[in-house]
Image (tube, rainbow, N blue to C red):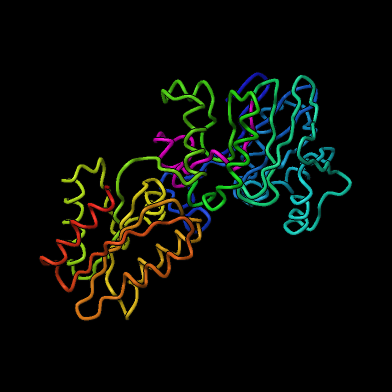
């Protein structure tokens, strides 16, 4: 697959994987992207997971067609991208590896060598001429590892973006970009919104026609034609996500329920939101739905309700875990409503509030719904108050 004049795709699809990073369900697999720039000199852009080394090397060999690569550019050292570096350096003993100083320190840890006699250390603003193509390096620390560099090819107007603008899913499966990119972003990158915002300011100064990420499709004219979108669509979503803004107006209700009474209360509350004109109400059972999907929705909407049972005098374990995920990912700029259930000593709202205090710039609604066993008139009135406050 040709990305632009002189730039070819040589990545691989992984349908063997079930959990990405041992945590995220990936029913449609993963893509480990790699690219080759063919010019007076040849640069291979990143390697792939070690399980696919030979397939990748075969792809590279086919792309260079008898020539020898001059450079291996390493943008990111996470093992799903760096796992085949050693094999490449052995296959092409005259090649130079190009990376940041921190990336070379990681190579020493992973491979027992930093290729001191075959390395080119680059930093922000450094350039690498390949002929007609010249790479300019863009530092992107903590997007989402500290060693990350990106590179920009002005001749082709292509940004090689490391893990930014990536998504879950192999490239031979058709699916909506935003859904799996959103889940990927908030799970993998979401904590580092400040750093992504800094990166977007740098990208905004470049004339970018295509983005080549390390996961997911290449965002270019061909892909835009298939999706009826343009590069601005993806940049805008990244801006919303990294600034912790509101992507979709509505309310997300995340709940846990033991015997069904909290679920019944949540259904009543959802109906009240809808009756009051809320444009969208999404309800998720935390015990049964993918946790990463629930985290994604918590960030997507500007308003969220957490509803749970009191358990051992505290917060039900699944809800506790969910809130921990939000805290770990810098959850902020949201309005939060609380619903608690407890047959004799409801304390879950107090526990949830305490956990949420670790988040910054959260507003917790004054109205709290307390269900004692099964929602009655008192709880219904509290639901009305909560819905009115959150939709005001």
Q: Relative to 159, is 246 above or below?
A: below
Magenta stretch: dominant secondary structure:
loop
Can you see residue 256? yes
User: Camera-side residue: 69 or 199?
Assistant: 199
Above/below status of 368 relative to 205: below
In this view, the residue in front, 23 or 392, is 392
Give above or below for 254 relative to 184: below
Q: Quadrant of the N terminus?
A: top right
Q: Is residue 83 visible?
A: no
Which residue sits at x=53%, y=29%?
219
The reply, left or right, for residue 56 in relation to residue 70 is left
Taking the magenta stretch, the answer to whether it contains residue 159 is yes
Q: Nearer the viewer, residue 241 or 377?
A: 377
Relative image position of residue 3 (x, y in whole percent) = 60, 24
Residue lying farthest to the right in this orientation: 117
* Residue span colored magenta: 158-183
Question: Residue 68's quadrant in the figure?
Answer: top right
Residue 376 appears left or right of 280:
left
Residue at (35, 67) in percent of width and height: 318
């Amino acid at each position: 697959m040709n990305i632009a004049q002189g730039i070819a795709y040589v990545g691989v699809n992984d349908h063997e994987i079930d959990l990405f990073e041992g945590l995220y369900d990936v029913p449609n697999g993963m893509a480990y992207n790699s690219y080759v720039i063919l010019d007076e000199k040849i640069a291979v852009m990143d390697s792939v997971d070690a399980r696919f080394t030979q397939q990748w090397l075969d792809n590279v060999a086919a792309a260079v067609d008898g020539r020898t690569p001059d450079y291996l550019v390493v943008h990111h050292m996470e093992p799903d991208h760096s796992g085949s570096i050693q094999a490449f350096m052995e296959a092409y003993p005259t090649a130079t590896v190009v990376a940041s100083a921190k990336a070379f320190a990681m190579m020493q840890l992973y491979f027992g060598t930093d290729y001191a006699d075959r390395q080119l250390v680059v930093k922000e603003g450094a350039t690498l001429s390949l002929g007609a193509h010249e790479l300019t390096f863009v530092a992107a620390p903590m997007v989402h590892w500290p060693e990350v560099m990106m590179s920009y090819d002005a001749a082709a107007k292509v940004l090689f973006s490391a893990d930014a603008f990536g998504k879950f899913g192999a490239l031979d499966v058709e699916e909506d970009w935003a859904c799996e990119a959103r889940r990927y972003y908030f799970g993998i990158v979401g904590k580092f919104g400040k750093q992504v915002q800094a990166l977007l300011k740098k990208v905004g100064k470049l004339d970018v026609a295509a983005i080549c990420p390390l996961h997911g499709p290449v965002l270019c004219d061909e892909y835009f034609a298939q999706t009826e979108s343009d590069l601005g669509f993806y940049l805008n979503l990244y801006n919303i996500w990294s600034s912790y803004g509101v992507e979709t107006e509505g309310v997300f209700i995340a709940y846990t329920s033991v015997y069904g009474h909290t679920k019944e209360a949540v259904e009543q509350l959802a109906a009240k939101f809808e009756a009051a004109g809320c444009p969208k109400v999404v309800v998720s059972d935390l015990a049964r739905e993918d946790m990463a999907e629930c985290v994604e929705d918590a960030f997507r909407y500007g308003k969220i309700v957490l509803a749970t049972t009191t358990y051992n005098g505290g917060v039900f374990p699944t809800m506790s875990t969910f809130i921990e995920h939000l805290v770990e990912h810098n959850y902020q700029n949201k309005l939060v409503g609380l619903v608690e259930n407890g047959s004799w000593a409801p304390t879950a709202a107090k526990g949830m509030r305490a956990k949420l205090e670790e988040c910054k710039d959260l507003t917790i609604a004054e109205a709290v719904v307390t269900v004692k066993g099964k929602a009655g008139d008192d709880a219904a009135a509290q639901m009305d108050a909560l819905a009115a406050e959150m939709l005001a």
